[in-house]
Image: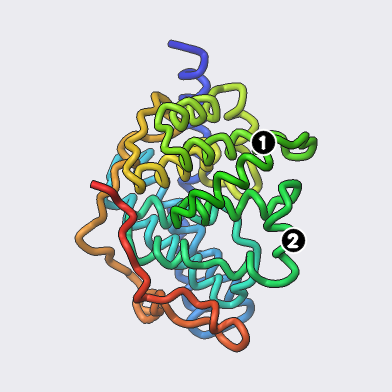
């Protein structure tokens, strides 16, 4: 057994122990659903707690049960609940990792909504940061360019940041190497970057971030996102690492995505934003498949 495999197996066990309790928190789930429906207390917090329950079950349905169907259903619910949270503050920070569960679901409607959601990068206070390679917003905006196939702009931004001397957040430079390979259609280059990104040396740093509580012991979150984006554009990447589950990569939507709670069914994914943000609302008629068969 190699050292990297041993490390992953140990990490997997830690993940199962940590996430299983959140996936089984039925009493907390019922209470938060009741509070959200009746708008008791902080209903945005209640939504986030329900979302956490779906994220935990998404991970457990695969890493414990090996059930790809259930995995995609839970991923869809997690992505939709996050979409409901965004409704209340559509201008909030929208980093690349927000796309994870939508992409894992393979549901075209919700992926379309996420790739259209650019408002956080278009408000006046964020435009400079979006185009400043030394700011986190620069990194987050790259995912939207990649999802929408804006290759010329993506390539230019990658070349810009990779030619600079970056001291802060140097650990993210490898992400722009991936985006550059994607923009250039370089399948071998993409595979090489993801192999490096999931190597023991880098994974132990990049897998652990504040937002990765349910995923850090199971997957390399950004690497999975990038692999899914590449597959959506027809690049069937082959990366030999447990940090990117191979069964997750093919783009195969479910026949339907059941929603177990009435409040979830009642929420229209393409509900317009309110007030001054309405014009920035993603639109249902712009749903399109990015898959190249």
Residue 40 appears at what percent x and percent y? 58, 82
Dividing the picture into quarters, in which one does residue 196 lie?
top right
Q: Secondary structure at mark 1?
A: helix
**Disc 1 to disc 2, C-alpha distance:** 19 Å
Residue 94 appears at what percent x and percent y? 60, 60
Q: Residue furthest top?
A: 1
Question: Could you tell me if residue 16 is visible in this image?
Answer: no
Q: Which mark is residue 162?
A: 1
Q: If the image is split into quadrants, where does the N terminus sit? A: top left
Q: Who's the residue at 32% across and 60% down the image? A: 107
Question: Could you tell me if residue 202 is visible in this image?
Answer: yes
Residue 221 appears at what percent x and percent y? 51, 42
Q: Secondary structure at mark 2?
A: helix
Q: Which residue is mark 2?
A: 128
Q: Is residue 64 left or right of residue 212?
A: left
Q: Are marks 1 and 2 in contact (CB under 8 Å)?
A: no
Look at the picture and state if 35 lies above or below 112. Answer: below
For label 1, the crowd category at 10 Å Cα-Cα, with few meaning under 14, some 14 to 19 and many 20 or more, is: some
Look at the picture and state if 267 lies above or below 225. Answer: below
Q: Is residue 232 left or right of residue 83?
A: left
Q: Who's the residue at 46% across and 32% down the image? A: 190
- In this view, the residue in front, 12 or 118, is 118
Dividing the picture into quarters, in which one does residue 205 lie?
top right
């Amino acid at each position: 057994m190699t050292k990297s495999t041993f490390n992953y197996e140990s990490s997997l066990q830690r993940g199962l122990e940590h996430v299983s309790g959140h996936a089984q928190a039925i009493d907390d789930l019922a209470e938060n659903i009741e509070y959200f429906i009746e708008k008791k207390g902080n209903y945005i917090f209640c939504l986030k707690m329900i979302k956490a329950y779906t994220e935990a079950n998404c991970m457990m349905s695969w890493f414990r049960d090996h059930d790809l169907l259930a995995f995609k259903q839970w991923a869809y619910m997690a992505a939709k609940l996050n979409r409901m949270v965004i409704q209340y503050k559509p201008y909030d920070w929208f980093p690349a990792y927000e796309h994870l569960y939508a992409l894992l679901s393979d549901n075209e409607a919700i992926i379309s909504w996420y790739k259209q959601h650019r408002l956080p990068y278009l408000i006046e206070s964020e435009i400079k940061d979006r185009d400043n390679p030394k700011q986190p917003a620069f990194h987050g905006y790259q995912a939207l360019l990649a999802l929408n196939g804006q290759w010329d702009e993506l390539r230019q931004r990658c070349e810009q940041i990779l030619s600079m001397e970056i001291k802060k957040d140097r650990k993210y430079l490898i992400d722009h190497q991936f985006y550059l390979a994607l923009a250039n259609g370089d399948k071998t280059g993409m595979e090489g970057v993801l192999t490096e990104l999931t190597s023991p040396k880098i994974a132990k740093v990049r897998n652990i971030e504040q937002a990765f509580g349910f995923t850090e012991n199971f997957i390399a979150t950004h690497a999975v996102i990038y692999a899914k984006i590449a597959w959506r554009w027809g690049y069937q990447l082959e990366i030999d690492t447990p940090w990117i589950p191979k069964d997750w990569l093919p783009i195969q939507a479910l026949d339907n995505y059941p929603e177990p709670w009435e409040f979830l069914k009642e929420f229209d994914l393409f509900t317009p934003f309110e007030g001054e943000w309405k014009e920035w609302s993603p639109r249902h008629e712009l749903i399109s498949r990015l898959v190249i068969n």
